[in-house]
Image (cartoon, rainbow, N blue to C red):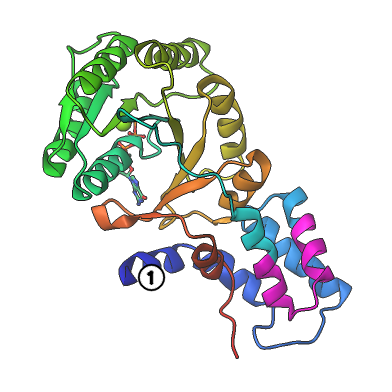
């Protein structure tokens, strides 16, 4: 836990230091117009985007609170999403994981499989990234370590066929959780996006209520482009939640707020590294605290 937050705090230090120049941590005094403009700039630099940054400052200015506390409150409100994870009344919980190349899908699935298995659930993973043999082997290592099972086919097999097979056998063999991994794809590649739509359709064919959740994994260091990615994947794959990874690297953090605000999608998990402990359920309050300068009493 401690190391998770220290990695997150270290990862977001650039944005936080930037904001610390403009937001006096201990001051109850209202900021001047030009100070608020500096805060707005700090938010834009932190990847919050112009529209949201203006909106956050407007909201914070209306509050009868110390400036830092007011901004924190405004940011947390943007991130709190009451949407509960959709669990089926009976049968397995079926999760489809999608996203652009290299964002961390396979690693995240490995970590999720381990988490679910540690809760005593029987977990099946479908290796529907059939592009590279190495992708399936990478997944197999995680799955084995998690004590979960995996469905795979030959290299180059139809990803939709692997997904169908996975759902069918997962239901027949009474798994509690089924997670389908997919190949990374750029949202502008029509052929690959059509293929993803087909994977989704086929999952529904194998189980009419599925997928119960579709989580898009986003690289936190992507910047503004993440907005276009989420827009397109949501349209094609019906994204229901987001996982933002690599917040330990060059990410500025504000993209998390921007995505949550723009698409009203819950952030389910965030990742700050490559090991199992580096994935945590998202906590809006803790995240905003890492992004803003520390409040002093
Ligand atoms: N620093 C850091 N690295 C991460 C994080 N999550 C994943 N990675 C690394 O990112 C790289 C790509 O991860 P994968 O899980 O293979 O990504 P993917 O989305 O499955 O990639 P494709 O299947 O090729 O699209 C690996 O080296 C991971 O270890 C994270 O939160 N922080
Ligand atoms: Mg992968």
For the stretch drawn in magenta, what is the main secondary structure? helix
- Which of the 4 image quarters holds residue 43? bottom right
Residue ID at (52%, 34%): 240
Q: Is residue 150 left or right of residue 7?
A: left
Camera-nearest residue between 106 and 115: 115
- In this rendering, the answer to whether 281 lies above or below 67 is above
The residue positioned farthest toward the bottom in the image shown: 297
- Which of the 4 image quarters holds residue 144? top left
Q: Quadrant of the C terminus?
A: bottom right
Residue 223 percent across, percent down from the top left: 57, 45
The residue positioned farthest toward the right in the image shown: 33
| Residue where numbered disc 1 is placed | 6
- In this rendering, the answer to whether 282 lies above or below 213 is below
Magenta stretch: give its range.
Answer: 54-73
Image quadrant, ligand 2? top left
Residue ID at (26%, 45%): 116
Q: Quadrant of the N terminus?
A: bottom left
**57 falls in the magenta region:** yes
Camera-nearest residue between 148 and 58: 148
Camera-nearest residue between 19 and 89: 89
**79 falls in the magenta region:** no
Residue 26 percent across, percent down from the top left: 66, 88
């Amino acid at each position: 836990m401690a190391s998770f937050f220290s990695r997150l705090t270290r990862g977001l230090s650039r944005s936080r230091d930037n904001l610390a120049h403009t937001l006096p941590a201990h001051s109850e005094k209202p900021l001047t117009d030009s100070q608020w403009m500096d805060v707005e700039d700090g938010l834009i630099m932190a990847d919050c985007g112009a529209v949201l940054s203006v909106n956050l400052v407007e909201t914070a200015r209306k509050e009868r609170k110390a400036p830092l506390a007011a901004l924190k409150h405004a940011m947390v409100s943007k991130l709190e999403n009451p949407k509960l994870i959709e669990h089926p009344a009976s049968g397995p919980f079926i999760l489809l994981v999608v996203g652009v190349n290299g964002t961390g899908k396979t690693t995240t699935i490995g970590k999720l499989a381990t988490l679910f298995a540690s809760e005593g659930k029987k977990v099946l993973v479908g290796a529907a990234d059939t592009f590279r043999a190495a992708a399936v082997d990478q997944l197999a290592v995680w799955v084995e370590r998690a004590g979960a099972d995996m469905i795979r086919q030959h290299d180059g097999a139809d990803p939709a066929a692997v997904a169908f097979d996975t759902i069918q056998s997962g239901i027949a063999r009474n798994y509690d959780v089924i997670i389908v991994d997919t190949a990374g794809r750029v949202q502008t590649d029509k052929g690959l996006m059509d293929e993803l739509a087909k994977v989704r359709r086929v999952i529904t064919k194998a189980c009419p209520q599925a997928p119960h959740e579709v989580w898009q994994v986003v690289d936190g260091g992507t910047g503004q482009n993440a907005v276009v990615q989420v827009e397109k994947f949501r349209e094609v794959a019906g994204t229901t939640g987001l996982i933002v990874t690599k917040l330990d690297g060059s990410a500025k953090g504000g993209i998390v707020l921007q995505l949550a605000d723009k698409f009203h999608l819950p952030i389910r998990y965030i990742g700050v590294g490559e090991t199992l402990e580096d994935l945590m359920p998202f906590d809006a309050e803790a995240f905003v605290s890492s992004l803003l300068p520390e409040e002093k009493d």
